[in-house]
Structures are given as C-alpha cells and as structure tokens.
Amino acid sequence: MTSVRADYVVIGGGVTGLAAAWALARRDREVTMLEQAAVGHLAGGSHGSCRIFRLGYEDPMYVRLAGQARELWAELEYSCGERLLHPAPQLTFGPQMTEVQSAMTEAGAPCHLLSADEAAERFGCVTTAGEALLEPDSAVIAADRALTALATCARPGERVHALTGTRAVALADDGRRVRVRTSSGDIEAGRVIVCAGPWTAGLLATAGITIPGEATLEQVAYFAPASPAQPAPASPAPATPASPAQAGGPGEEAGSQGRTTPIFVYYGGEFPYGLPVPGTDRYKIGIHRGGPPVQPGRQHQEPDPALGQRIERAARSFLPGLDPRPLAVERCVYDNSPDTDFIVGRIGNIAIGSGTSGHGFKFGPLLGEWLATLAADPAGGAGPGRSWAAGLPPSRFAPGRF
Ligand SMILES: Cc1cc2nc3c(=O)[nH]c(=O)nc-3n(C[C@H](O)[C@H](O)[C@H](O)COP(=O)(O)OP(=O)(O)OC[C@H]3O[C@@H](n4cnc5c(N)ncnc54)[C@H](O)[C@@H]3O)c2cc1C
C-alpha cells in the first residue's frame, strides 16, 4: 500500500467532478481526481449522447443560475475549440407552463407564448395540444463530447492527475488534512471534493457526515422519423465555437430554428421530455423521475417494459412523426435529494456536490466552479483570466438544510 500527499482530491469523474477539477486547474491548483470506473461509464449519471440545456424552470433562481452556467459552458467550448451546446428551440407546455413563463420573465430570460396554432405552424412536428412557451436560448448539450472535453482538453498545464479505476473507500478528516483510503493506497489531502453522484451519501458516512440521497434507475429511448420526409433534428454544429464574450444569447443557428426539431418539456404531471440528438436524425425521449429506486452499486441495463410503454406513449402523443418503435434504450441513474435542490457546501475540509436530481448536467460547470471556490478560495474571487465570479452556491443548497 502506498501513501501519497495531494493538495486537492476530487472524488467522482462525472460532469460535476470533471468540472470541479477543471475549475481548480484554472486556479493553478494541482488536482488528483479519482474515478472508480471510467469516465462516461454506464453506471454513472453522466453517460449518454445528450442532455437538455434550458433556462426554463418554474423558479427564477434556477433560471438565473442556468444563465451563469451558460457562460461557463462557453468558456469550456472556447478553450477546447469545440461546439458542445447545440442551439435548439424549446417548447414547454403542460400544467406548470405559466409558472415557467413567470419565472423566466422575472429573471429576464427570453420566452414567447405561442398559441396552439402558432406552435403547430412553426413546429408542426410537435403536438402541444394547447399553448406552448417558446424558449429561444435553449440547446442540446453533446453530453459525451462534454465529458471528453472536460477530461482531456480542459487541463491547463496538465494540473489534473486522473486516476480512473480507483475507488475512494473511506474518508477521515482530522481538521488539518483528510485521509482518503482508496482501492490502491492512501492519500493525505489538504481538501477533498466529493461528487460521487448516488454514491456520495455512503462515502461521506465513513467520515461521519450524513446527507440524504436516493438513487432511481431511469430510462430513455431513441426514435427515428417514421419516414425520411419528416423534418430532421438539429443539424451538426460548427466545429469552432464563439468566444465567451459572444456567448449567452441565441446561437448562430438561431435563425434556422423554424427548421430544427425542438426540444420539448411537458412541465408538470408525468413530465415527459424529448430532444434531438445532435448530428443525427434521432430523437431521445424520457420521463423525468419515472424510474424505480435502486442501490447505486446494483444497477442493471435491462430495459423496463412498463417504462418503455410510457415513453412510447409519449412519442406517439407529442411527436407523431416518429416511428414509435425505439431504435435503442438506455438506463441511467438519478442522484435525488429529498427536495430536488442540489446539495453543495463544505463541512470541514470536505466540499460536497451531489443531489443533482436529474437536472444537473446543464449546471455542471457552475457546480464545479462553486466546489472549487468552496475548497480553494472561500472568498469567492473570480480567478485568473475571469471577468466575473460565480461566487458561492446559494445557501438554499447547503447540506445542513436536512
Ligand atoms: C436519463 C437521464 C437524463 C438526464 N437529462 C438531463 C438533462 O436533460 N439536463 C440536465 O441538466 N441533466 C440531466 N440529467 C441529469 C444529469 O445527467 C446529472 O445530474 C449529472 O450527470 C450528474 O453528474 P455527477 O457528476 O454529479 O454524478 P455522476 O455522473 O453519477 O458521477 C459520479 C461519479 O462518481 C464516481 N464514484 C462514485 N463513488 C466513487 C468512489 N467511491 N470513488 C471514486 N469514484 C466514485 C462514479 O463512478 C461516477 O462516475 C439526466 C440524467 C439522466 C440519468
């Protein structure tokens, strides 16, 4: 058994951990990142082709935070030279649509209410069966590419030492340093950031820290147009992104929004959602918080037929131009907090980023920035080369609220 010293250890190589390592590296800090499997592995919550980036929440706080996250995504795109967020309009409808509209209006985010006829005229491939809220600044995140970008490009000065296939087994914080027992030896760390998704509560318990967490095993399915005559989903994006200064508004593809198959979110009730897969003619559909509870270490990838039927029903109802027989099905784990707000804070020398509750990918770079600030820079400075500071997370996310 070896024992080494490290200033910062990040535990978890999902979007949150990778973003935290990136944020620390940008502050010139040396980071050791531990991932029990491989980046993008099937049992984590960050794998798969794509995620929705939306400003549309029923709570103005999340609308504003999504705007901040957008700026950090632009920085990542710029430093990696790759488009990761593919602009795509979003249609929100359903029982909570008006709450989303109010929150977006209060937060100053652009949105327009469309009548059912206007929605049908502009986005005929989606059946809204009523008014719909059009969000022009949403996007599809190329999730797998984003993980690769964070894991490979975003390492200024190679300051991140990634140990994949290495599991943190136990933590002990003596007030000065944290001893991290791993599957390949001990590490004495100055600060530890734990963003282990649904494994977070179990790992923190070894350090005497209690946080809640419930994992659920979700399911998504990929569909193709019923006939080649159907409109194609979002087209491949340009290879070179805009500079961060140019980001934040509608992307350069915005002018083509009328031709792009939109993202849809049925907000409220069963909460089905769908999004075009960048660069393909496929469309991904899921049901938010539709899956059963699961032990994070006991997941399987077998499709659930009942969940599959609900997803196929959503495909028939909302995108009748799709062939409702899925081409592929994926399982993926949610790391749920009791109130669906994130859990972000610091206890002693351990910073915690978890509870992303099925909506955390879009906030990944912001979560990473907060965690780096909590671990390295509690004063909340902007850091080198940055014109603004994300500061500290809202107190509403504090682990002590439970
Ligand atoms: C089907 C599905 C659809 C989604 N859609 C959206 C969407 O459209 N928009 C959106 O914003 N969000 C979405 N999400 C949510 C988003 O993907 C997650 O919130 C986010 O990816 C969670 O990232 P994470 O890094 O916190 O956790 P994870 O990705 O789970 O990463 C945690 C990592 O820690 C590692 N780990 C755990 N324990 C240890 C240990 N002891 N030692 C070392 N490593 C360890 C794990 O192996 C894992 O890789 C979706 C999620 C799913 C499942």
Image: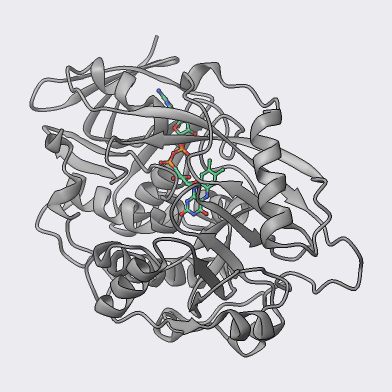
193 or 138: nearer the viewer: 138
What is the total number of numbered labels drawn onto the structure image? 0
- Relative image position of residue 194 (x, y in whole percent): 31, 34
Q: In this view, does 75 lie to the left or right of 378?
A: right
Left or right of residue 255, residue 102 in this image: left
The quarter of the picture where the N terminus appears is: top left
Q: Is residue 117 above or below residue 364?
A: below
Q: Which quadrant would residue 263 be assigned to in this image?
A: bottom right
Q: Position of residue 90 (x, y in %)?
A: 54, 71
Identify the image quadrant of residue 306. Answer: top right
Seen from the viewer's position, the closer of residues 84 and 117 is 117
Residue at 18 percent across and 62 percent down: it is: 391
| Residue sitting at x 40%, y 46% | 16
Image position of 204 with respect to 376: above or below: above
Question: Residue, x 55% and y 72% (percent of image)?
Answer: 130
Spot the residue most to the bottom.
255
Q: Residue at x 50, y 68 (%)?
A: 92
Left or right of residue 75, residue 314 in this image:
right
Instruction: Give the image location of residue 338, x and y in percent.
Output: 28, 35
Front residue of 9/388: it is: 388
Work out whether residue 4 or residue 375 is closer to the camera in this orientation and state it.
375
